[in-house]
Image (tube, coloured by chain):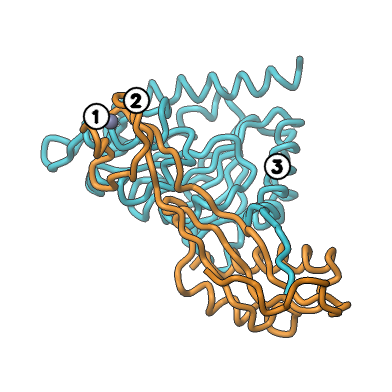
Chain colours: A orange, B cyan
Amino acid sequence: MHEMGITQNLLNIALDHAQRADAVRINSLTIVVGELSSIVDDSVQFYWDFVSQGTIAEKAQLKFKRIPATMRCAGCGQTAPLDRQTYTCPVCGGSSLTVASGDEFFLESIDVDLADSSPVPGSKETSHARD
Amino acid sequence: MPEIEVVEDIMSVNDRLAAQIQGQMDAAGVLGLNVMASPGGGKTSITRRTIEALKDEVRVGYMDGDVVEIDAQHIARLGVPTTLINTGGDCHLDANKVNLALPRMDLSAIDLLVVENVGNLICPAAWRIGAHLNVVIASVPEGSDKPYKYPAMFRGAHVLILNKIDLLPYIDFDLDYFRHGIEVLNPGLEFFPVSAKTGEGFDAWLDWLRAQVAVKKAAVSA
Ligand SMILES: [Zn+2]
């Protein structure tokens, strides 16, 4: 399983950014994963719980934003979901395509508690939107 | 609970180290190959045949990241410097493991470093190891749908070798479907259909590789 090493990288990046922001706790991480990137399944949370033990990211929740694979067709100019069985255009049936998305694999953001937890004027700390 | 924007590639730490390794090879005029395949795809037989054919004209070094030590012994018998990479039972090599093995390989004594990755078509795709060229080996018995099942490996390849083409008359392998798959995933990918058994197709691959080695070497003496 390559998820172990990936999870370790993820932790290092998150801790680095949290430290720079003077955060005392990481509550969640939002990870963007493209359909073609071959990485990440549910086992990541398992490894995460293990590698994050004893850090400010312990028990943080991993949120995955999955990006579908899409293609651009040279024939009709459309961008559409990539047909993974045939790699042909679902609009015109053309076969001259390029991949337009699906390789993504990055840490988009972390949700943290700051050292100075005095509430920011005009914002409630529970107002963070969940999607 | 403030949200901090990060937008950092999760492989960035590994990728930075891989770039350093590549820099060391560049400085020494060494071309690095990262050879990847499924188990049984013919990784070792292609590597061996390639080294055998080139060793009298190109100074080759070989690093073995496979779990079976036998491969390295076979290559060592060809008289080229070899070293084992401790994979720690992992399913892939990463920049760190290659970096730890690198001091055991005298880069000034070689022109071409062949790193044989762990037999696996999924995990190694994500991890750069500092090689210049990712060489992916597929084989006819594995089926023509490989580029559809393992897109990441083909997206990241620089060279694709299709091995065991001597079996094409006997196996239901749709070469057009296969080629279409790689053309969509990786337009213009160097493609060499070969048979490690009969040697068919090897001349084209070897000529191409010789030229790449020469370019790398010329870059350092320029
Ligand atoms: Zn179209």
Labels 3 and 2 in the same subunit: no
Mark 1 crowd level (few <14, some 14–19, many ≥20, 10 Å Cα): some
The answer to whether the residues at label 2 and label 1 have Cβ atoms under 8 Å apart is yes
Amino acid of disc 2:
Ala
Amino acid of disc 3:
Ala
Q: What element carries label 3?
A: helix
- Mark drawn on residue B19: 3
Residue in view at x 35 percent, y 35 percent: B182
Q: How many marks?
A: 3
Point out the image quarter for the C terminus of chain B.
top right
Mark 3 crowd level (few <14, some 14–19, many ≥20, 10 Å Cα): some
Q: Does the residue labelled 2 lie within 8 Å of ligand 1?
A: yes
Q: Is A49 above or below relative to B16? A: below
Q: Is mark 2 on a helix, strand or loop?
A: loop
- Image depth: mark 3 or mark 2 in front: 2
Q: Alpha-carbon distance for marks 2 and 1?
A: 8 Å
Question: Where on the image, by quarter, is ligand 1?
Answer: top left
Point out the image quarter for the N terminus of chain B.
bottom right
Residue pointed to by mark 1: A94
- Left or right of A72? Residue A93 is left
Residue pointed to by mark 2: A74
Labels 2 and 1 in the same subunit: yes
Can residue B101 be seen by looking at this rendering?
no
Name which quarter of the figure residue B122 lies in.
bottom left
